[in-house]
Amino acid sequence: MNPLINMDTRATSTRFTSALGLATLIGLGWLAVFGLFLSPNDRVQKTGVRILYIHVPSAWLAYLAFVVTGLASAGYLWKRTRSLTLDRIAGASAEVGVLFMGITLVSGSLWGKISWGTYWTWDSRLTTTAFLFVTYIGYLAVRDLGGSHEQRARRSGVLALLALVEVPLVHFSVRWWRPLHQQESVAKGKLSDLMLFTLFVGLVSFTLLYVWLVMHRQRVAALDDMVDDGGLDRALADRRSEGMP
Amino acid sequence: MEPVVELVDVVAVLGQFPVLAGASLRVARGEIVLLRGPNGAGKTSLLRLCAGLLVIRRGSANVLGVDLVADRSAVRSRVGLLGHSNGLYADLTVADNVRFWGATIGASADEVLGAMQRMGLDDRLADVAVSRLSAGQRRRTALACLVARRAELWLLDEPHAGLDAAGRDELDAILRAAASSGATVIVASHELERAGSLATRVVEVVAGQVRERAL
Amino acid sequence: MEPVVELVDVVAVLGQFPVLAGASLRVARGEIVLLRGPNGAGKTSLLRLCAGLLVIRRGSANVLGVDLVADRSAVRSRVGLLGHSNGLYADLTVADNVRFWGATIGASADEVLGAMQRMGLDDRLADVAVSRLSAGQRRRTALACLVARRAELWLLDEPHAGLDAAGRDELDAILRAAASSGATVIVASHELERAGSLATRVVEVVAGQVRERAL
Amino acid sequence: MWAITRLLAGKDLRVEMRSRVIINQVVPFAALMMVMFAFALDSDTVLARVAPGLVWLAAMFSLLVIVQRSFALEAADGALDALRVAGANAGGIFLGKALALAAQLAVLEVILLGAALVLYNSHIVGSGIALLVGTYFTATAGLAFVGTLYGGLAVGAKGRETLLPLLMLPVVAPVLIGATRATEAALGTNGATATDGWPWVGLLTLFAVVFGVGGTLSFGSLIDE
Amino acid sequence: MWAITRLLAGKDLRVEMRSRVIINQVVPFAALMMVMFAFALDSDTVLARVAPGLVWLAAMFSLLVIVQRSFALEAADGALDALRVAGANAGGIFLGKALALAAQLAVLEVILLGAALVLYNSHIVGSGIALLVGTYFTATAGLAFVGTLYGGLAVGAKGRETLLPLLMLPVVAPVLIGATRATEAALGTNGATATDGWPWVGLLTLFAVVFGVGGTLSFGSLIDE
Ligand code: HEM
Ligand SMILES: Nc1ncnc2c1ncn2[C@@H]1O[C@H](COP(=O)(O)OP(=O)(O)OP(=O)(O)O)[C@@H](O)[C@H]1O
Ligand SMILES: Nc1ncnc2c1ncn2[C@@H]1O[C@H](COP(=O)(O)OP(=O)(O)OP(=O)(O)O)[C@@H](O)[C@H]1O
Ligand SMILES: [Mg+2]
Ligand SMILES: [Mg+2]
């Protein structure tokens, strides 16, 4: 039996991921309740502050996703652990990371329109975020170049490590460029308790969402690879029959 | 003695297409093997695979004692490949090109000069840019680069195409000399009379597979 | 009857180099002429000159009744040239290419399809991009483009190179059929046995000049 | 002549459809240019002020890349020789290639303009829309004609391509200036109003007509060796 | 490894000597860019203020063109395959091509900087010369390494070249910032002084080292099919 597929449902879910999915849903529901109704308005930002509960968790989860990609890639490239599962985790995590970074960008832009009166400015935080986004889109594009699974893993593994080195470089260099974005307000305790708690709910539910997505994407990627190999079998049969008179 | 090339059921893919669909081949030292077969059969792919340029998806391949599945790159400096294209820098002169490709394996100036003379590239042509050469003169230059490389395994893709009568004879002599001094030669060609008389063995490639065949 | 090609003491220059240094040639309708000669002799240049692609510095040239010194362009749509390179768009499919080159002289869809089938480019290959073809398959595509053009004068530069045994036979049959239906064919080649048996006459090119030669 | 025009334009666009070089390569290049400008210039007020100029500057550089690609296509496997031998009308070749070029450039410019509006915080003045569209068409036509003309001159014989930027610089400058001024008027940059822009569109039209007609008539002598 | 480095750098520079593509084609392209900037910005004070940024912006775009040229050279007649078969050390190939790239870029930048001084009325502050030289070397090295690294990845298989601008954009940004800031300090733009510039040179050095070492180690996996 194929360990990747639940034969009852013919899906990539197992009992664990189903439970995880349920927990994620509940978490997101809580987030909606707290974020939209229970948490207070901000003094300056009024109700616009509620974007925070999506904006900040998605940004942090994107960071986490990219770090996971880097670690998994390093694991793959390290001679003794060379396993394609690690490569697929790297890819899945990057995909989800790009998704979260996209959410950060969109929510931030909307928020910017509300509080700064513009969708975009060339602030350092914004620029860094955009560059990070582009970097990992490039990474995903490189994964799509074709070739054998091992080629893909080696090429993109190198790239993921380079990207990981690149991130602090970009981040710190842009820092002195044109700061406008919020400074560390969470750590400095500028938020009220309920706001902080809502943010915490968001963080937990986004983390659950991240793990759930990565697990599924990783399994789908494994299936993709298998389909690929199956396609090779069919193509081989075609090619061989070509030579028959 | 260990064979120079030993392929067992090799599968290689370009894009989605299996250019080699289970090819098995065994070549001993000193042989001159002719690959023949219809257009698109996979001769070029087979030669490139032996040079360590294709990824092996299935099967096993051993060339000059190197396991290509484990490490394709170790074999490369020991083979010489002449492909359909010449691998020349069009803006450089003939002499520049031969010198450059010779230098990548540390050939001396004399060896380079000797290789050029062997292929009939005299002083007049030595300082002409490759972009101004005729098709046959380019092919001669590519062959001179190859000769300067002193490879253990020569892989040649239609080496006679474009050469004039004298060039063909010269090339055959070079290949025979190489084989008798211990190198191994694999030639893909559609010129069956000429290449057949050169070869010690003929192998037929069809639809990405290999079939042995009598001379 | 007026000759199809009549060159008298033609001189043509590329850069500073006289690629043709006084070439004279007369070809009658329905002939299949083989150009032979060493690498760099000027065969390719001679063919390009007949196609109206080279500037004539001295001498006179008349092709299909057109005076090339006065107007090189009038002859062009009536000749078909297969050069060393194939003139294909690598990103387009085989069918796209043949259709495009057919359309430049108004060939119908049926003619295009027929040309492709003649050159063994079946349905499987029709929709493959040229960049994924093997060398021989590309040459076949170029020949199909040529066949679709219904030229009065066929100029072919080493047309056999790269084709497999079946392709060679097919090509020879096509050329013989063209010649017998009133077209004229000039072929440059180094494959003397095959091209020699195809040709009705052999002409030797040496150092930019032309010498008639017995079969 | 029109048959060849259609045939060539269709072929070039089909190549682009299959290879997606412009979409996948030139568009990111142009977008990168816009982002980097914004990034390097480092000041909102300067940025909004120079936005129209930057759009057309980026369009012009992209033009260079597209022209090179368009003719590299013909030169790669000797197709240009084949075209000559096919006896294709030179004027038709010129118009066909210019048409395909204009189509690709047009798509690109829409993206550039959109990017400028978002990135540089520019706004279209209500009455400026017609002006913007007019500028867009005439400038695109002018650039495509000039690009094709000089691209054809530069193709083939090695060493010629060196000349391309050198020859194009003085010729394209009027387009750049005219299009910039007209776009400034359409965007109301520096207090310009839409009526200030129309004379520039006139200039652009004149330019496109001169190079369109000139190119059609002279292309044969240019590409023929 | 060093033998291959020398061999490849020598070969690339010789090709440039023979073909003069960079000198005759990219330099006018870059110069044109500077002139056009002057046109588009159309204001002396703004111009002098943004001059350092423009110099490095132009250098960066030229880098893209040079990288493409450098690898097109290898791909044209299958030389890249031949290089692979020659068993040339991948790290050596990387360093060799980067070296040649850096040399060409260096020449270009001198011209760009000269053009900026003349066209934009900028002046070097006395104490800024050492800073300028330091910036110049470290930024050039960084750009050359990044260009070679991603150029190698993008060469070969069709469709890949698309990736070049995409991959390079975020990576080159720090170089652009660092070099611009250091140059501003050297030219005394916006009241900056030379001492403000040296930390940026440090950043540029770090950057060059990271990509130099990273490229040398990983180039094999990137170019190998
Ligand atoms: C396109 C626009 C924006 C982008 C791309 C963006 C991006 C980010 C990122 C990447 C983070 C995570 C930073 C970190 O912890 O390292 C973040 C955090 C944050 N953002 Fe934004 N942002 C944008 C707009 C805004 C706006 C308009 C506001 C509010 C006025 C805002 C408020 C915040 C706050 C309060 C945090 C949490 C900061 C902390 O305590 O660390 N952002 N943003
Ligand atoms: N662009 C050029 N500039 C200068 N000389 C050239 C140029 N092109 C070709 N030549 C020279 O012209 C001569 C004739 O070339 P041509 O291609 O006609 O020879 P060919 O007979 O077709 O040779 P081959 O059998 O090798 O194809 C050659 O010696 C070549 O070096
Ligand atoms: N990049 C590619 N993508 C997909 N298929 C390819 C690619 N390159 C080659 N092929 C296919 O692989 C097959 C084998 O090609 P190969 O070049 O090895 O043939 P060959 O025997 O050398 O033919 P020829 O005699 O024409 O040179 C061909 O059918 C070709 O269409
Ligand atoms: Mg082949
Ligand atoms: Mg020839």
Image: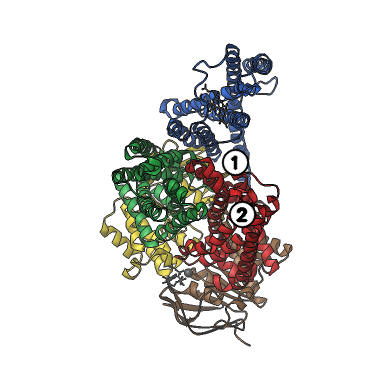
Chain colours: A blue, B yellow, C brown, D red, E green
Residue C151 or residue C167, whichever sits in front = C151
Q: Which residue is mark 2?
A: D105
Count the marks: 2
Question: Against D90, is A202 above or below?
Answer: above
Q: Which residue is mark 1?
A: D121
Give the image location of residue D148, x and y in percent. 58, 63
Residue under the point 67% across and 65% down = D5
Question: Against D195, is D222 above or below?
Answer: below
First in sequence: mark 1 vs mark 2: 2
Give the image location of residue C94, x and y in percent. 63, 56
Give the image location of residue E40, x and y in percent. 52, 53
Q: State which quadrant residue A41 falls in.
A: top right
Q: Is residue A134 visible?
A: yes
Residue D134 or residue D166, whichever sits in front = D134
State the residue lying farthest toward the bottom.
C1
- Marks 1 & 2 on one chain: yes
Q: Nearer the viewer, mark 1 or mark 2?
A: 1
Quadrant in which the N terminus of chain D is drawn = bottom right
Q: CA distance from mark 1 to mark 2?
A: 23 Å
